[in-house]
Amino acid sequence: MVLIDDDTLIGLIRTGDTHAEALLCEKYLSFAQNFGKKYASLYSDLGLSADEFTAVAFTSLAIALKKYTPNEEKSFYSYWTTIAKNQCINFVRNNSYSNNDFIHPLSLDSSLFDDGLTLHETCGSDDDKISYSVERKLVHDFIVSKDSKLTNDERLVGYFTFIEGYNFEEIKMLTKWKADKVYRVSDSVRKKVSNFFKSGYFK
């Protein structure tokens, strides 16, 4: 198999070569997943998952592709890395205001509950459960509302994520989408849900 360098791939992508785009996306999805694991470990106290950071890092690829100019001083990988780091830091800043379970849904895989607690018990005190229920209803109403201006894909992933509590692998299996599409759509809908709450609900 002949390996094609990033600059060559980018040149082909800018001429409309979809095969080159697929190759670059496949390559950088692997890099983004490594990013996700690293940042989830760094910010484990916030409850943000590796998949969430992976989505942020992977969608940074589009920003890098748009702005990058090939040069000898900085490779595309280094350029993307800088953008991905900044995007991940911004993601932490924008999501550290809340640790609610509906924002970081638990997987349907019961094996993840190593502490033996039930889903009901992990929601916290009675007051927390009431807050969780109200916020869950608000998110549901936002996702199904036409005024939310979500795309059909965002609405589907938003419902699976925030209402049903599916994780990335489960959504990938249900939608039969490739991983890169799941990450792109998930990142987009999370930003819109986050902005919805910041627009006035918590003020």
Image: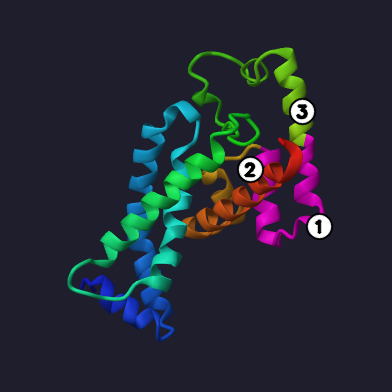
The three-letter amino acid code for the residue at tag 2 is Thr
From what the image shows, is residue 18 above or below residue 95? below
Is 44 situated left or right of 160 in this image? left
**Nearer the observer, disc 3 or disc 1?**
1
Q: Which residue is drawn at 77% across and 22% down?
A: 130
Please, which residue is most extreme toward the bottom here? Answer: 15
User: For this rendering, which residue is in front, 16 or 138?
Assistant: 138
Is 149 situated left or right of 3 in this image? right
Label 3 neighbourhood size at 10 Å, few (<14), some (14-19), many (20+)? some
Q: Which residue is drawn at 33% across and 56% down?
A: 82
Q: What whole-number distance in Å separates the C-alpha atoms at marks 3 and 1?
A: 22 Å
Span shown in magenta: 137-164
Circle 2 SS class = helix
Image mark for residue 156? none
Q: Residue at x 77, y 47 (%)?
A: 142
Q: Report the residue marked by disc 2.
A: 161
**Nearer the observer, disc 1 or disc 2?**
1
**Residue 66 belongs to the span the image colors magenta:** no
Q: Report the residue marked by disc 1.
A: 147
Q: Which residue is drawn at 37% across and 62% down?
A: 26
